[in-house]
Image: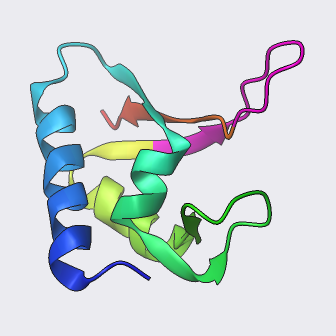
Amino acid sequence: MPSTPEIIRWQEALERELAEARSSKLTVPYDQVARAFPSQSPHPDTFEFNLIDDMTFTQWAEARGWKAIPIQESSAGETSFGVILFTRIT
C-alpha cells in the first residue's frame, strides 16, 4: 500500500482537478482515484493499485460538492479500468 504522503499527493492532485473544472461534469481515470483513496483490498485485475475505498472517497467527493459514479469504459480488444464520473451537486 502507498505511503500516506503519496496518498495525500494523489488526493491533492484530484482536488485541484475538481477545483479547476469548468464544467459540471468531469471524468477521471479509475486508477487515479484508486491511488488517492486505496482500500485494503487489492484490485483483482492488477497489482498496480488497490480497489477504491468507496466510503471514504464518496464522503470526500460530496464534501467538495461532487457526486462520483464509476463508469466502465471498454473498447474492442482493450482492457480498461473505466473512469469515475464526477457531477457537481447543485
66 on left or right of 22:
right
Residue 89 at x, y percent in the picture: 34, 38
The quarter holding residue 60 reads: bottom left
Residue 59's place in the image compared with 77, above or below, is below
Q: What residue is rendered at 54% in x and 64% in y?
A: 49
Magenta stretch: give its range: 68-80
Position of the C terminus by quadrant: top left
Q: What residue is rendered at 22% in x and 59% in y?
A: 11
Q: What residue is rendered at 10% in x and 26% in y?
A: 20
Q: Give the main secondary structure, helix, strand or loop, of the magenta stretch.
A: loop
The quarter holding residue 77 reads: top right
The quarter holding residue 74 reads: top right
Residue 27 at x, y percent in the picture: 44, 26
Q: What residue is rendered at 26% in x and 70% in y?
A: 7
Instruction: Check if residue 78 falls in the magenta segment.
Output: yes
Return the residue nearer the eye: 41 or 24.
41
75 on left or right of 38:
right
2 on left or right of 78:
left
Residue 1 at x, y percent in the picture: 44, 83
Residue 15 at x, y percent in the picture: 17, 47
Residue 4's place in the image compared with 78, above or below, is below
